[in-house]
Image: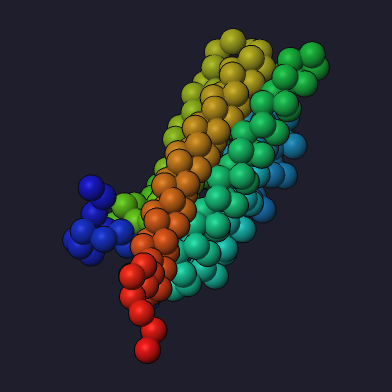
Amino acid sequence: MSTSCCGHDSQFDGASDAFRRALWLVIAINAFMFLVEMPMGFIGGSEALKADSLDFLGDTFTYSISLLVIGRALIWRTRAAIFKGITLSLMGFWILASAVYHIFILQVPSAQIMGGVALAALAANLASVFILYRFRNGDANVRSVWLCSRNDAIGNIAVLGAATGVWVSNTGWPDLAVAGIMASLFLSSALSIFRQSVAEMRSLKTSTQNTDGHDHPRPHPHATIE
């Protein structure tokens, strides 16, 4: 059974000032890093950097949605998590398509730019992971925030590896390989979010049916009306 950041058996739904402050801070970090990393991805010719910058942008929007649904009914929080899962899926498929396209137009990205920007992005994402770590075991909406930040940090480490590979091999293949790995990670996380969201939707439906059954008992078939 999952436990919340507060130590209770029920899942944490994000309804706390501490979580809201953490989200605002992480949103600012992600928005800033998108503005830095996307231009550098084009300058350095790196698909991995472009993919990572889009992830920062996607996180900025999805974390904002998480803020909007905090304190709302479970159905709204679950729908927000499903939307974030869809966003992760779209980013994953986009990265895969872009990587396949660049197989036929292979270029050698700048290893120096890749490495420098990836280090800055890693520092930003590690800060986000540290800020959100205590909230990692919440409901689908809260947990999706943690998964996105964790994926970002893993992705940055992978980009650093790609920069090293590009520098050693003087080819663009390591960049494309890491872009493919990042896409797989996004799709895997999206599937995890979808599964938890579906489970919460089923739990909500069962709870509603049980409530309706208690609120509206059927009359006994032999009862008489006076």
Q: In this rendering, would 77 be left or right of 130?
A: right
Image quarter of residue 147: top left
Q: Position of residue 82 (x, y in %)?
A: 55, 50
Q: Position of residue 22 (x, y in %)?
A: 41, 65
**Outermost residue, right side:** 105
**Outermost residue, top side:** 169
Q: Position of residue 161 (x, y in %)?
A: 49, 24
Relative depth, front residue between 177 and 138? 138
Q: In this rendering, would 218 be left or right of 79?
A: left
Residue at figure coordinates x 30%, y 59% from the top left: 11
Q: In this rendering, would 21 be left or right of 166?
A: left
Depicted 21 relative to depicted 173: above or below: below
Q: Position of residue 133 (x, y in %)?
A: 32, 53
Image quarter of residue 14: bottom left
Q: Colour mode? A: rainbow
Residue at figure coordinates x 58%, y 30% from the top left: 183
Depicted 19 relative to depicted 103: above or below: below
Q: In this rendering, would 117 be left or right of 101?
A: left
Image quarter of residue 171: top right
Relative depth, front residue between 43 and 130? 130
Residue at figure coordinates x 49%, y 32% from the top left: 188
Q: Is residue 65 visible?
A: yes
**Outermost residue, bottom side:** 226
Depicted 218 relative to depicted 42: above or below: below
Q: Is residue 110 visible?
A: no
Residue at figure coordinates x 36%, y 62% from the top left: 210
Label count reads 0
Which quarter of the rendered picture does the C terminus lie within?
bottom left
